[in-house]
Image: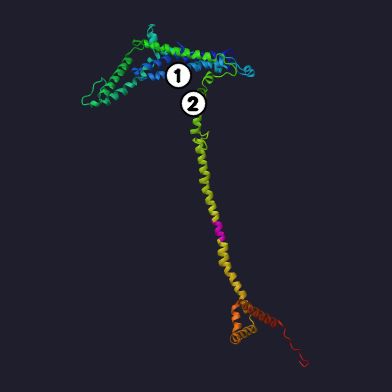
Amino acid sequence: MGGLSSKIKTTYRTMLIGTLAIAGVPFLSGFFSKDEILWQTWSRNNGQFRALWVVAYIAALMTAFYMFRLIYLTFLSKPRMSHEVEHHIHESPKSMTIPLIVLAIGAIFTGYLGVPASLTQPLHLPNLTNRFEAFLEPVFAVEAHGATTTAAALGANEHGTLVEGTNAAKATEGEQAATHASAVNEAAKEGENAPAAVHAPAAHEIEPLEYILMGASIFAAFIGWFFARRAYQSADKGYKEPLEVAAPPVYRMLFNKYWVDELYDYLFTGRRKLGPVRLGVQGLGDALWKFDANVVDGGVNGTGWATKFAGTVSNWWDKRVIDGLLVNGAAIVTRVLGYVARLVQWGLVQWYALVMVAGLLGLSCYYFVPPAYVTWLRAHWILSFVLLIVVVVMGGLVAAMSSERPTATPKPSMGD
């Protein structure tokens, strides 16, 4: 951007008023609120929170610096946009500028609802002292009831007197709570009995230190403006941040916002991997996906595979063992034995007579054949068995052929 103060004047002026207010420039709303915060942080509880005052003061310096940095880089420095973009820049419509004007008016005047006593008493304007605080005072009167209850629990009445027979270990704490309760009750009663007109609060002693701290607050706004003006007043195209030139590591750390986003991506969202591992929500999603794909779906697929395998084994067992070996096997064995039996069971008397004759011959040979031949037949029993089968088959064939010959029928004589 840059150089927009003459192009969007309303936006520039309202933004400048807001910047001056939030930086703590005197007599704007931010000055009264910031000064009150810093003073209460310094003085409350006998200075127990002065370390927080240091933190708050550093924050006030940084706030003034980055707000004036915004003003210079956006509105007061040299234009850094292209000519095409610069040609199209125009003021926002009234739906945007009117709310900005209302906010700017609030940034100027609302601070006067909380003017501290250190500014109203020297001007003899006590009725302007913290009017908003006086307006809200009855709201916090309910604290009295809680304090009274605490005091009673610790053994003291609302006037700060210990009840007889109370445990002595609670005496100090009970007295403090009762004293506080009594003070709040009295303040509430005085507020209820006061006339309707706004009454002036009681004057209190003003410490010179309050003015010193007020000056330090104003000085923080001036310092922030001074360094922002020095660094960014002449910012042009291609400018570099002064911190980037002076301390590149610090600039990178601030530019990357202390790498909080990267740490968040590593640990919580999981958009970045920590080595090969992805943590965070996406890592959890990946883990659940892998568990579903490998364990749940794997279990389902494994069950399906086991069922299919069991079906295949069962089918093979039924076909090969039950049907093949036990049922069909018995039929095959029966058929083979039938083929063997058919060799000797022709159903012909001639065949049976032939077998009987062959048996007699074989038995006779056992007694009449020389022992050397019998020993040879025993040594070659397979060949002997084959020869026997051949003889039997040939005999059967001969018997079958003889049985199939047609018998001659006698011719009738002339006398018949």
Q: In the image, what residue occupies the spot 59% across and 72% down?
A: 334
Q: Which mark is residue 258?
A: 2
User: Disc 2 and disc 1: Cα gap in Å?
Assistant: 17 Å
Q: Nearer the viewer, residue 36 or 157?
A: 36
Q: Which mark is residue 12?
A: none
Q: Nearer the viewer, residue 92 or 84?
A: 84
* Quarter of the image where one finds residue 384: bottom right
* Residue 376, image x, y percentages: 61, 80
Residue 242 visible within the image:
yes
Q: Is residue 220 above or below residue 319?
A: above
What is the three-letter code of the residue carrying label 1? Ala
Most common secondary structure along the magenta stretch = helix
Q: Which residue is mark 1?
A: 59
**Where are the magenta residues, as a range?**
310-316
* Quarter of the image where one finds residue 45: top left
What is the three-letter code of the residue carrying label 2? Tyr
Name the image quarter holding the C terminus: bottom right
- Residue 199 in the figure: left or right of residue 15: left
Give the class, few, some or many, for how many residues have Cα within 10 Å of label 2's Cα (few <14, many ≥20): few
Does dot 2 land on a helix, a strand or a loop?
Answer: helix
Q: In the image, what residue occupies the spot 56% across and 62% down?
A: 318
* Residue 374, image x, y percentages: 59, 82
Name the image quarter holding the N terminus: top right
Does dot 1 land on a helix, a strand or a loop?
Answer: helix
Q: Is residue 54 above or below residue 153?
A: above
- Residue 415 in the figure: left or right of residue 349: right
